[in-house]
Amino acid sequence: MTTKRHLAQVNIGRVLGGPDAPAMQDFYRNLARINQLAERMPGFVWRLQDETGDSAMSLSWPGDPTMNVNMSVWENDEALATFVFKTVHQNFYARKHEFFEMPEDPSVALWWVEIGHIPTVAEAKERLDHLIAHGATAFAFGWVDLPVAKLWRERRCA
């Protein structure tokens, strides 16, 4: 099957402490390892990085310099879902409330991009703002709106 588009994702969060905070040490100690794992995953295309090349932790969200941003592009939803939910990343995702403030509004947005397109942080903000204002649309949507999410629900019910 030939893919005509890739899946971009952005997630934002305000960390609950710096690298020296005892509650945050597990997060920071594993950040480079998780990012390297993503880059080795089948279907990985690109991820946002700061000048260190390890993460994007020094980059901030437009309009809120206290908010961290993470962005990546994947060949398809299965590739992204496999990384997020079927690798060691799932352990940190399940603990996100230990590391980040949990906002009421969505903090994750996904959208389809043309192959070769690398989204900007400004584009990601536009997508997430749209999701917050209008709910899931073709312009921006959340995890539950992915085609793979329907398959997961069907497998659980079978």
Image (spheres, rainbow, N blue to C red):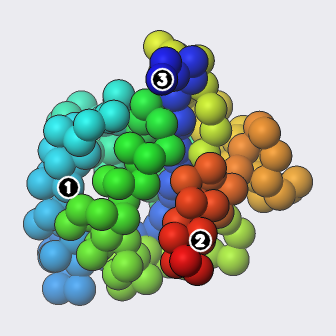
Is the Cβ of the residue at disc 2 closer than 8 Å to that at disc 1?
Answer: no
Q: Tell me the SS state at disc 1.
A: helix
Query: Which residue lies under the disc numbered 1?
Result: 34
59 vs 147, nearest the viewer: 147
Say which residue appears at 23% left-offset and 86% top-offset: 23
Q: Is residue 26 left or right of residue 156?
A: left
156 vs 102, nearest the viewer: 156
Q: Nearer the viewer, mark 1 or mark 3?
A: 3
Image quarter hosting the C terminus: bottom right
Is the Cβ of the residue at disc 2 closer than 8 Å to that at disc 3?
Answer: no
Q: Is residue 6 left or right of residue 138?
A: left
Q: Is residue 9 left or right of residue 17?
A: right
**Residue 14, position in %: x, y?**
47, 67
Of all residues shown, which one is farthest toward the right? 134
Instruction: Tell me if residue 6 comes above or below residue 125 in the rendering.
Output: above
Of all residues shown, which one is farthest toward the front? 158
Query: Which residue lies under the disc numbered 3?
Result: 1
Say which residue appears at 20% left-offset and 55% top-offset: 34
Q: Tell me the SS state at disc 3.
A: loop
Q: CA distance from mark 1 to mark 3?
A: 29 Å
**Residue 108, position in %: x, y?**
58, 57
Of all residues shown, which one is farthest toward the top? 116
Query: Which residue lies under the disc numbered 2?
Result: 153
Q: Amino acid under label 2?
A: Arg
Say which residue appears at 47% left-offset and 13% top-offset: 116
Q: Amino acid under label 3?
A: Met
